Amino acid sequence: MNADEFVEAVRSGNETALSRLGSSKSLYADTRGEMEPDAVLRAAADAEHAAAETFAAWADGEDGAAGEAFAATAEEERDHYERVAAKLDDHEPSGDASAMQAHLRGLDGTVERLGGLVGRTLVAGKSKEQTTGFFVGQADPRTAGLFRELGDDLDGQLERATDALAEECSDDEDWERALDAASGTVQTAYEAYTERLESMGVNPKPVC
């Protein structure tokens, strides 16, 4: 397996989950039904802050391409947080990690963490698309443009993660471990999305 095949395997193996995480219901779940600009910004800021904390912790004690990938992504996520938080009058990051971030923080091996980073990046891409669309609908092109730019940064994050995986994975078993971690990350995000919507009395499945 190579880097491109790996990403395609994660996408195809989690097609339903990623599709539903890319629906408008995902934003509704993230804000607990509070579909107002400040609520959307707060949810986004919390997500960026938690990601920065996770990847900074991973970068400590890690060297080589993986360490560089984690450190660069942590720095980028800090910048993302600051840019989103600047849109709010005041923001205190939530101390509660999301289910996905809790899952990521439970990953120990370098290969598994790189796989988790790929999974998180794909989930974040779906979230950025929805947030961008929300602010387009709010006739707020500046904020929509901000989230479009943040989404563009995910391409570099994905490339760094997969380049590091190509260095770390020496055989098919390594790639499978990374794939399990990536899929586990996506599925954890999807399960949290499903549980939250169901707790709000909303059907998480699309209406045909």
Image: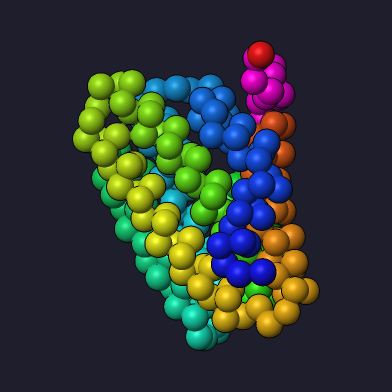
Q: Position of residue 119 (x, y in %)?
A: 60, 55
The C terminus appears in which quarter of the rendering? top right
Residue lying farthest left? 142
Task: Give the extent of the magenta segment.
Answer: 196-207
Residue lying farthest right? 173
The N terminus appears in which quarter of the rendering? bottom right
> Which residue occupies 53% across, 75% down?
164
Colour scheme employed for the rendering of this structure: rainbow
> Which residue occupies 42% across, 56% down?
155
Q: Is residue 201 magenta?
A: yes
Quick one: 162 or 69, which is closer to the camera?
162
Quick one: 190 or 93, which is closer to the camera?
190
The image quadrant of residue 14 is top right
In the visual, does 195 lie left or right of 131?
right
Residue 16, above or below 97: above
In the visual, does 37 lie left or right of 61?
left
> Which residue occupies 45% across, 78% down?
68
In the visual, does 122 lie left or right of 105?
left
Residue 207, above or below 68: above
Quick one: 76 or 178, which is closer to the camera?
178
Q: Position of residue 103 (x, y in %)?
A: 68, 56
Query: How many labels were placed on the picture?
Result: 0
Residue 4, above or below 146: below
Q: Position of residue 51 (x, y in %)?
A: 50, 57
Q: Is residue 102 visible?
A: no
> Which residue occupies 49% across, 80% down?
65
How would you classify the magenta stretch by its main secondary structure? loop
Residue lying farthest top? 208
In the visual, does 89 lie left or right of 107?
left
Q: Is residue 109 magenta?
A: no
Q: Is residue 20 visible?
A: yes
